[in-house]
Amino acid sequence: HLSIIDTANTIDYSNGEIKGESLINATKYLKELPNIFEDQQSFENTDPNKIIYEVQAFLPVKEGLEGGLFFGKTIIYPGKIGDEYFMTKGHFHEKPDRGEFYWGIQGEGILLLMDKNRNTWAEKMYPGSLHYINGHIAHRTINIGESILSFGACWPSDAGHNYQEIMDNGFSARLKEIKGKPQLIPVR
Ligand code: F6R
Ligand code: ZN
């Protein structure tokens, strides 16, 4: 007879946690993010082993395979370096025509987006917000709240990550807390 089986993987909708097989976990410490924050003094005065964000991903196929999908969850802890909130490195996809979905699960954030011509804009993230990130668009997430920001992501297994462009040139705007409120400030 034909059997009905349980899936190997599950997701907890309350916090986005994925359980099961083919999972990877990555912890991003402040010391691994030297070119992200503008305020060098605050960067040096903060514990280098402070965890800024954590990524979990379900990779059911090999990285680079055309036609597959990856499913991830990111949590960003609350905090600031100078007047900038904790955020991800941010990246373009290596294959620039590969898009991605993000969706807010917990907390309050900003999705910072930038096209190839360095035009930057931003979307609010909150539990239930849903974001389609076109290929060709760099993306970075920022926790503007006082609790954990968690969000889900789904992207093609052959998208790849181009971190270098953002490492070298950053985004064309920075999100800063000014008089207690997040504000986008153009760079130079
Ligand atoms: C995958 C993706 C997310 C991020 C994660 C961490 O394409 O966009 O899973 O990888 O939110 O951000 P980065 O990769 O910029 O450190
Ligand atoms: Zn991405």
Image (cartoon, rainbow, N blue to C red):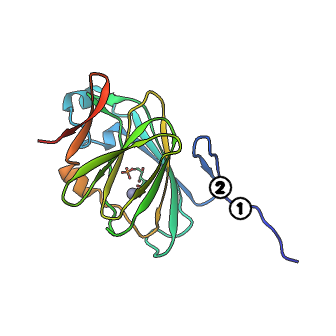
Q: Is residue 91 visible?
A: no
Q: Position of residue 90 (x, y in %)?
A: 32, 50
Q: Position of residue 15 (x, y in %)?
A: 58, 41
Which tag is nearer the camera, tag 1 or tag 2?
1
Label 2 element class: loop
Q: Quadrant of residue 50?
A: top left
Q: Of callouts 1 and 2, which one flags the residue occurring earlier in the amino acid sequence?
A: 1
- Residue behind mark 2: 20
Which residue occupies the extreme right position in the image?
1
Q: In which quarter of the image is ligand 2?
A: bottom left
Q: Where is residue 116 in the image (x, y as percent from the top left)?
A: 22, 61
Position of residue 17 in the picture relative to residue 100 (left or right): right
Residue type beneath disc 2: Gly
Q: Where is residue 127 in the image (x, y as percent from the top left)?
A: 52, 41
Mark 1: C-beta under 8 Å from nearest atom of ligand 1? no
Tags 1 and 2 in contact by the CB under 8 Å rule?
yes
- Residue behind mark 1: 7
